Image: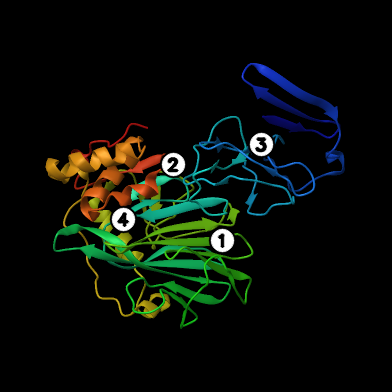
């Protein structure tokens, strides 16, 4: 389906196979008077209706502006209609496509992402996908700055898999400062996992807790927490049991946005990340650089912030001894893990490698769930000991 809005007329075209349906020549939008914001999607009929899509549906709305320039329009995580559809924001960011400039996002029955203009994740042992779509592994232990934007910050506590898996790590806890509130998810602590402004807090299932500063928190089931502010900035923490670790999604309510941390890119370049001192690393990443100035710089300074202190004192500050991928596993571990991920429908080579490593190292088939329906990364940042040891995991 495509729509077109000009100063004098609006049109829409809908294709079912080779059959086209069109409604040209109307002027419903009246754009001649000037406009600053637009929304393009598939919604239900008037009066609060809902458009219902069949199982397995994926829709990628794409709003292009034509004004003679090349700068992409700003994305704002807001809606302007009372009508809805039954899709969720899909995991991952779709790859950009010509012509542009445009705003686009992924919707699917699978869901799994946040209401945001730009999403990122840190999952399993620990595979990061940045806001621009770069997949890379970061296996250090300690407290790290995932994302730092003008209006909110997100920290994660990573712990090593030692002694069994000393070169792997997982997220043990997550914390954010949003709307002036300090919120932490601490799964390993006795009592409620959620702490709000220093107080352990229990939530009723799907009943939001509204805080000062326009922040809402709600819980789905007994293991998923979502934190959302009025600007659309969001954090979702999914607690996995046996072994206990946390998969995290972070969403930005506006794009472009000034954001730093291990989930951010440098220079709006999907293949680059930047240390806290501004040093830029370009994929493939040298092990010494990633776990040297980059990793050290993005550790939470002990006296800078205490968001994760709600989860207890930090007990680990270490780095792996070498890069760790599926190829480093014994075939007796990797082969059955690979089959589990393939059976779950994970087929992108980079995601399949990450999934296989997680299933094998974490020792549970459920580790594959987070990859189901996930959009392939736009780029892959492999970690290598030297440039001579670089062998691409996936061709892009």
In primary-sequence order, the first of circles 2 and 3 is 3
Residue ID for mark 2: 373
Viewer-side label of 2, 3: 2
Residue 324, image x and y in percent? Answer: 20, 50
Viewer-side label of 1, 3: 1
Is there CB contact under 8 Å for labels 2 and 1? no
- What residue is at 40 percent from the left and 43 percent from the top? 372
Q: Identify which residue, 63 or 248, lies in the foreground.
A: 248
Q: Quadrant of the C terminus?
A: top left
In primary-sequence order, the first of circles 3 and 4 is 3
In primary-sequence order, the first of circles 2 and 4 is 4
Residue ID for mark 4: 126
- In this view, 80 is above or below 31: below
- In this view, 364 is above or below 40: below
Residue ID for mark 1: 233
Alpha carbon distance from label 2 to label 4: 19 Å
Residue ID for mark 3: 64
Q: Secondary structure at mark 4?
A: loop
Is there CB contact under 8 Å for labels 4 and 1? no
Quarter location, residue 161 = bottom left
């Amino acid at each position: 389906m495509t729509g077109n809005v000009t100063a004098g007329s609006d049109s829409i075209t809908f294709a079912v196979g080779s059959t086209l349906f069109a409604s040209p020549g109307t002027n419903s939008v009246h754009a001649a008077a000037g406009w600053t914001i637009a929304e393009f999607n598939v919604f239900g009929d008037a009066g609060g209706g809902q458009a219902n899509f069949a199982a397995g549906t994926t829709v990628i709305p794409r709003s292009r502006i034509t004004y003679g320039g090349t700068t992409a329009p700003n994305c704002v995580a807001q809606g302007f209609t009372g009508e809805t559809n039954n899709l969720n924001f899909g995991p991952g960011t779709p790859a950009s496509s010509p012509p542009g400039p445009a705003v686009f996002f992924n919707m699917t029955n699978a869901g799994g992402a946040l209401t945001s203009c730009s999403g990122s994740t840190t999952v399993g042992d620990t595979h990061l996908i940045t806001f621009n779509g770069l997949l890379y592994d970061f296996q250090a232990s300690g407290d790290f700055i995932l994302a730092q934007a003008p209006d909110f910050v997100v920290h994660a506590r990573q712990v090593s898999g030692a002694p069994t898996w000393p070169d792997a790590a997982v997220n043990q806890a997550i914390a954010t400062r949003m709307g002036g509130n300090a919120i932490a998810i601490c799964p390993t602590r006795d009592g409620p996992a959620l702490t709000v402004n220093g107080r352990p807090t229990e939530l009723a299932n799907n009943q939001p807790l509204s805080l000062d500063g326009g922040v809402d928190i709600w819980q789905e089931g007994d293991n998923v927490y979502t934190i959302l502010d009025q600007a659309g900035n969001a954090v979702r923490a999914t607690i996995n049991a046996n072994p206990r670790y946390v998969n995290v999604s972070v969403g930005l309510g506006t794009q472009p946005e000034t954001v730093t941390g291990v989930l951010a890119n440098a220079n709006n370049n999907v293949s680059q990340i930047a240390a806290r001192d501004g040093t830029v690393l370009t994929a493939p990443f040298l092990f010494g650089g990633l776990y040297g100035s980059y990793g050290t710089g993005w550790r939470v300074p002990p006296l800078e912030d205490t968001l994760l202190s709600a989860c207890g004192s930090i007990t680990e500050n270490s780095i792996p001894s070498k890069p760790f991928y599926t190829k480093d596993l014994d075939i007796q571990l990797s082969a059955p893990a690979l089959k589990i991920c393939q059976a779950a429908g994970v087929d992108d080579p980079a995601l399949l490698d990450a999934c296989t490593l997680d299933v094998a190292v974490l020792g549970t088939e459920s580790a594959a769930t987070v990859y189901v329906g996930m959009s392939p990364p736009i780029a892959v940042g492999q970690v290598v000991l030297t440039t001579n040891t670089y062998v691409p995991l996936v061709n892009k």
